[in-house]
Structures are given as structure tokens and as C-alpha cells.
Image (tube, rainbow, N blue to C red):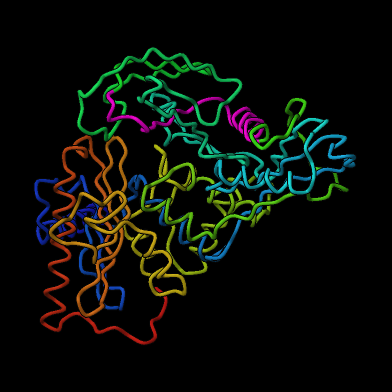
Amino acid sequence: MKVFSSVLVLALSCHIATAAALDLHGLKPDEVAVWAAPVEGGPELASLRADVPVNPASTMKLLTSWTALSRLGPGYRWTTRLVSAAPVQDGVLKGDLVWVGAGDPRFGMANLRSLLHDLRLRGIRQIEGRLLLDKSAFSSIGTADNFGGDEGKSFTVEPDTHLTGLKVAWLRFFNDSNGTRVVLDPPLAGVSLQARLSNGGDTAATCPDVRQWVHIREQGSQIDVSGKLPTACDGSQAYVNVLEHNDFAAQSFAALWQELGGSGPQGMAQGRAPANARTLAQYQSEPLTTALNDINKYSNNTMARTVYLTLGREAAKSGDTPADAQTAVRSLLAEQHIAAAALVLENGCGLSRRERVSARLLGQVLLNAARGPYGNELMASLPLASEDGTLKRRFASIGPRLRMKTGTLKDVKALAGYWQAADGRRLAIVAIINSPRAPAMAGALDAVVADLIHRFDHSVADGSAPAPADAIMQP
């Protein structure tokens, strides 16, 4: 018991000493975990509760991004296909058309239109059978539990093999010589739009967000829009999250197919592509790096979960896609000798009440990534301070030499990323608040990061920081 007490006192004293060395700007030592170290090698710059498991919120996306770059490669692409075993006679497909979903995280309406355009170029104008959705790419999608209060918001849209336009449709508003009106794009047959709009005239000089003047109510397949629309809002738009994934995909398909002059299909169902099916049209996505740019700069949960599931699909061992994704992450950590005792995974995106990392684990991933072949690709995906993404309005006095992934949940505020000094040397930084006070302490978190940057720059200036190395050992 005395030995245990001595160890506990020593551990607490180390935490207190480190906290004292850092100005926490009003944060309590037990509310925050901090870790920082030079990328080019050398001792840690700061470590406070660095091995304590904490909820990382969206900084978890860094772990998924690093694994995806390492396992899939930056040039990885998703291929979405339309296939059939049925014959084509006089422009009529005499049977079912199968849409084989790949889980492309950026597959949008324009991509679906391109896919259907290619089908029309093949000479097909009518689908006599059904549209079958082949969803075999993912065995299941995993969970993001206890976010029921956020249902319907775009950031909680679940991943899907047939994710199309992030499963949101657009309300497009007009106020011109033809009157005040709103239309749904695409025009989904299963969605009813009721509008009670009046002309708001010149009540606004600009229209940064049309929802300031109109009220949009979504309930299942019913959308109600009401309010006074200023002339400044002519051409504005707002998204709505409607229908379930299968219905949204099928109705989007039908709307765009009709727009292109096609007829059919005769209903929708789930089904597998026959073994003898031939490819009639296909769309290949942009590379993984483009998806990671959206995921990390704008903290897109749906897309991040889809990339995580793609890891499981491409490294299938058990046939359980989420379980295989977790195996892919853990195996890479083990290969790179990064201790993962603190790691708890649910969906790989940070939209989780259960996920945990330590600041040191996330920091070691940042070091490994920066020293590896795809460091530039990961860093390019991160928001630039004061310039874009989720950091556009933060760190104005520091500027774009700072690239950091942000994280925000109830009781969580997090930052993790890199600072680059004027001479090119870099600092990896992780700072995570887990506390009911987190929403009020964002400024304190930014100040802690700024202090670490100033400390690093001072050490570079006085020569105590190590110079960049031509060859760097993995951590």
C-alpha cells in the first residue's frame, strides 16, 4: 500500500509540476491533456496528463486519416457501377439494373448524373425492370450512439454504401418577376414540399443565410417552408435532410434519369449483382486525398465514418466491416510501435461518447505521419489557422503556419496538428479539454497552443531545438 501511495504521489507531483510549467489560462490541471514534441526529433516540449484516456472528439479523424493514407494510399479511388445481366433490345433494358455502391464519401448528384449520362450514351432509354441496390460493400455501418437529440442534422447522417450528396436535398429560393417561391432540388417524388412564402421586399441588403428570414420544418417526407423572403435572397439555398438512404438514392436516381429523358425503373429493392452481370456504366471518384481535405478541414463526420468503413472493407478478415476497420487501425499502430492501451474506437470519426485516445498516442501518430511518406498529404488536409475550414476565425495573430484539426462535442474541446517555424522546423501539438466547462474554455485552449508555439520558437531562436534531420527514425 505504501508503494502504491508513493507511486501515486509521484505521478500527481509530475502532473502538477508540468501544469505549473504551463500557463493553463484558467483551465484546471485535471480538465486538460497536453502533449507537444518537435517533429525533427528531440525531447518533448510539454506533457500534461499525456497518457490519460480522453475523448478526442473530431481529432480522432487524424487517426483514421493516417491509417487510410498508410493502408489505402493517397491515390485510392472508389468505383460506383451500374451493372445488369439483362439484355438490351431497342434501347430497353429487359430486366433489373443493379447499382453497386462502393461507399464513395464524396459521391454527389453531379456524379450520379454523369453515371446516368453514360448509361444513356450506351443507348439505353428505358429500364423495364427494377433498380436494385447492391449494398454488399459494408456488412454494417457501426454506431454513433447517444446523439438522438441531434437527429436530422447533417453531421449525424450515417454512412452508407449508396451515400449520395451526403443525403441532403437543396431548397432553392427565388424572388423575381415571377414571384416568391421555393423548389426542391432534386425533385424527389416521395417528398412533399409545402410553401407559404411572401415577398419581403428590400428588408435586407444581403442574404448570408436564408434561414434568417424563412422557417424550414422537416418531418419525415414532409417539408414546410414559411416566412417573408427578401429580394436579396433571390437565388439563395438551404439544405434539408430527408428520407432514408435507400429511398433518397432511388428517388434521386429516378429524378435525374427522367431529367435525362429516360423512363423507368419499375420500383426499387435491395439485391446482389448477378455473377454474370456486365458493367454498363461506372464512375470513379477523385482520390482519397480530396476526401481527406473535406473531412479534416470541415470535420465531416459522415465522410470520415465512410473512410473508416472502407478500411474494414479493403482489409476484410472477419467479414464484420467495423470490426475489420478497427483491426486495420490497431495493426498499423502496432507496426509503428505506438502504444494503444488508451485507445477506444467506435466509428473512427470522433462523433462518439465512447471513443478515447491519449494525447501522447495522438501525438505519436502526428510524428509518425510527418516523418512518413504521406506527411505532406495529411498536413495539406488540415485547416489553416485564420484562413480556412474550422480554423478560419481562430488564431488570427498566428496565421497559416499553424495547421490543426479541431474537435468539439458536449464537454470536449480539442486541437491537434502542427506548427512550422520560419526555418522549417515543426512542432506536433495535442491539447484536449474534457470538462463540463469545455464550451466556455475554447479561448484558454487556443492560448495554451499559442504558448507552446512561442516556447518552441524561442527554443529554435536560441539554438536549443534540434535542427532538421535528413533521415529520421520512426517514433
119 to 201, vertically: above or below: below
Residue that appears at 20% across and 31% down: 205
Residue that appears at 20% across and 51% down: 394
**Foreground pick, 332 / 263:** 263
Total count of labels: 0
Looking at the image, residue 195 sits to the left or right of residue 9; the answer is: right
Task: Look at the image and give the residue range highlighted in magenta.
Answer: 230-256
Where residue 197 sits, quadrant-wise, is: top left
Q: Position of residue 350 (x, y in %)?
A: 40, 44
383 to 161, vertically: above or below: below
**Foreground pick, 444 / 380:** 380
- Tell whether position 391 is magenta: no
Looking at the image, residue 131 sits to the left or right of residue 156; the answer is: right
**Foreground pick, 249 / 437:** 249
**Foreground pick, 73 / 216:** 216
Q: Position of residue 366 (x, y in %)?
A: 36, 65
Q: Quadrant of the C terminus?
A: bottom left
Looking at the image, residue 296 sits to the left or right of residue 39; the answer is: right
Q: Mark yes or no: residue 146 visible.
A: no
Q: Position of residue 170 (x, y in %)?
A: 46, 31
Q: Residue furthest front?
A: 177
Q: Mark yes or no: residue 313 visible.
A: yes
Looking at the image, residue 355 sits to the left or right of residue 186; the answer is: left
194 to 280, vertically: above or below: above
Q: Position of residue 275 (x, y in %)?
A: 86, 47
- Tell whether position 234 is magenta: yes
Residue that appears at 20% across and 27% down: 204
